[in-house]
Image (tube, rainbow, N blue to C red):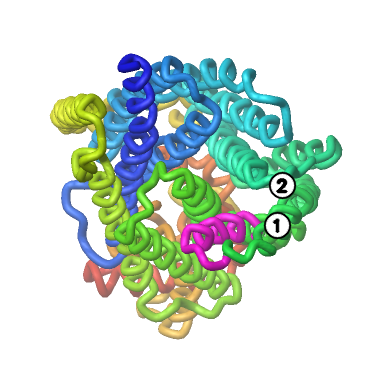
Amino acid sequence: MDKLQMPSIVSKSLPKTWMTWAVFFFFCAAVFGLAMRYFFIGEVPFFEYKHLLHAHSHVALLGWGYLLVAGLLTFSYVRSPHRLNIYKKILILTIIANLGMMMSFPFQGYGGFSIAFSTMHLVMSYVFAYFFFQDLKKSPSNTAKNLIKLSIIWMLISSIGLWAIAPIGATLGRLHPLYFMSVQWFLHFQLNGWFVYAFLGLLLAYMETKGTFVIIGKKTLFALHLSLFLTYALSVAWSTPITGLLYLNGLGVLLQVVAYFIILKPIIRHLYNIHTFSKSWINSMLWIGIISLLVKALIQATLILPDVANIAYSIRNYVIGFVHLVMLGAITFGLGALALKNKWFSNSSLSKTAWILLSIGFISSELLLLGQGTLLWAKLGFIPQYHLLIFVSSSFFPIGLGMMIIAQWTSFPLFQKSPNSIHIQQNQHKSKNTETMKSTVLMSFGIFVVLLMASCGGGNNENQGSYTPPSAQKEKIADPKGIGEIKEVNLSEGIDQVLAEKGKAILDMKCTACHQYDAKRVVGPGFEGVTNRRRPEWIMNMITNVDVMLDEDPVAQQLLEECLTRMPNQNITLDESRQILEYFRKNDRERTGGSDAALN
């Protein structure tokens, strides 16, 4: 009897332990994200923006997102205590990989330690897939199971992009379009394949527990799969602008809307008709997840128009808002609600407050991101105090997640009073379980400290783990005027204020999401001093002929290699580029005391 009870108690504690670690990494990703927001309103010492960006994206995607999805799949389909012990070991190694990425990326970006821990996480995802496929076979075949099986397949397919990065970088260079396409391949099939399919599958599985069975026909599934591949065309168009790709994406988003509608319609009808559904705050979180997925599909549907598609990937606010609709909306709230229903997340009053704060942060930040993006598209300028507002909005995430960690921690047996009626033997098992948890936390803290020391040491060499590809372009002597139709620019001694103000309006609309007017580097380099470093012809060619410049100009290629973010073609006219140049001259005179030094 005793031997049978012990695995049961361990099996019961593992889901909460798993989810607590997921929330911890979500909290860390939120702190990194908040620091990135602060870059636009103040100084962040000791860190580079791009390093924090990589830390934020990796910990959010592979820490929070991966652990949440993998945990829900595991505890929804695996019942055997023996098998759960295997997943416990997988969890420990995955935690170590995530801690390594969390401590190395902020200090060194892509370097030896961060790449090693990222690879470790990738290998552990393969191990998870191997064991989960075995356990999934034991479940009866149905639509939910098929979608979940496909989600794992998409996770494996997405990893092809990661394996392709190294050989492409070594042979073709990190500036080649295939390099960017490989990165986008991973992100696209992670978000829209692995995560979305898992959400749909788990949602259908939840409906089945309520007696509602949704059957998805082969044609609908085919449309869903085809849309997944076709919508990747927009990611390719980002690095390789080809008009035909936008039409493929247009077909894909139409198929996606149809497939989502067919799958979600009976689910929404069922949930809407349940009277108790509308009264539960947990169900409200589930509604946020479902609505986010629908809004994501509807926004993508507007991309059927090529002009709109061009705007979508050139305005950074839209890109970030779209990613957050999937990660923060559908996955966090949708799957988070399912975990709450299973009590793998604490559903205490403190947890309720935490989730409400998260919902406030998510909804307000999405409104700001998409609203500001729309203003930029309409050429109506900036929301007053936009960067401060979105910083305040983003602060709800670490605050809410900090409360959620406390709620999770206090829900463990260590903090629970045992009724007098509980047998002494059960209390002994709980005591052993508590001691096990303490040991796990202490071990993880020790790993955390070691990784911190290693990462700080590894960050001293900026070039550690980086690769500078051999390129014939680097051997060419750069034309100081750049490449394009602007061959000569005649400048007056003074500043044309009218021209400069028009240039600033264009920069505010199209450029300040990635660049600052001072020397601070965020996504791209700061504007301060640009007329003292580059000739006016080079600046205007870079603005109007961006794709050719990035492909052929050695200076532009060097900047791209430093930033690793390809500047989109904003379709700026020659007249507009001259207006921008004039504001650059004005900005440099005000900030550096002079301009046009590159002409001397």
Q: Amino acid at mark 1?
A: His
One can see residue 196 in this view? no
Residue found 27% across the figure and 56% down from its top? 403
Identify the secondary structure beneath mark 2. loop
For label 1, the crowd category at 10 Å Cα-Cα, with few meaning under 14, some 14 to 19 and many 20 or more, is: some
| Residue 109 screen position, x and y as percent | 31, 36
Residue that sits furthest to the right in the current view: 219
Disc 1 and disc 2 in contact, CB within 8 angstroms: yes
Residue at the spot of label 2: 212
One can see residue 107 in this view? yes
Of label 1 and label 2, which has the lower sequence position?
2
Residue 293 forms part of the magenta stretch:
yes
Question: Which residues are the magenta region?
Answer: 278-294
Horizontal side, residue 381 vs residue 597: left or right: right
Disc 1 from disc 2: Cα separation:
8 Å
Given residues 193 and 477, the one toward you in this image is 193
Q: Is residue 401 above or below residue 74?
A: below
Horizontal side, residue 109 vs residue 365: left or right: left
For label 2, the crowd category at 10 Å Cα-Cα, with few meaning under 14, some 14 to 19 and many 20 or more, is: some
| Residue 84 screen position, x and y as percent | 42, 21
Residue found 46% across the figure and 85% down from its top? 498
Residue at the spot of label 1: 270
| Residue 341 screen position, x and y as percent | 48, 48
Residue that sits furthest to the front in the current view: 421
Horizontal side, residue 447 vs residue 156: left or right: left
Given residues 431 and 576, the one toward you in this image is 431
Image mark for residue 157: none
User: Is the C terminus in the top left, top right, bottom left or bottom right quadrant?
Assistant: bottom left
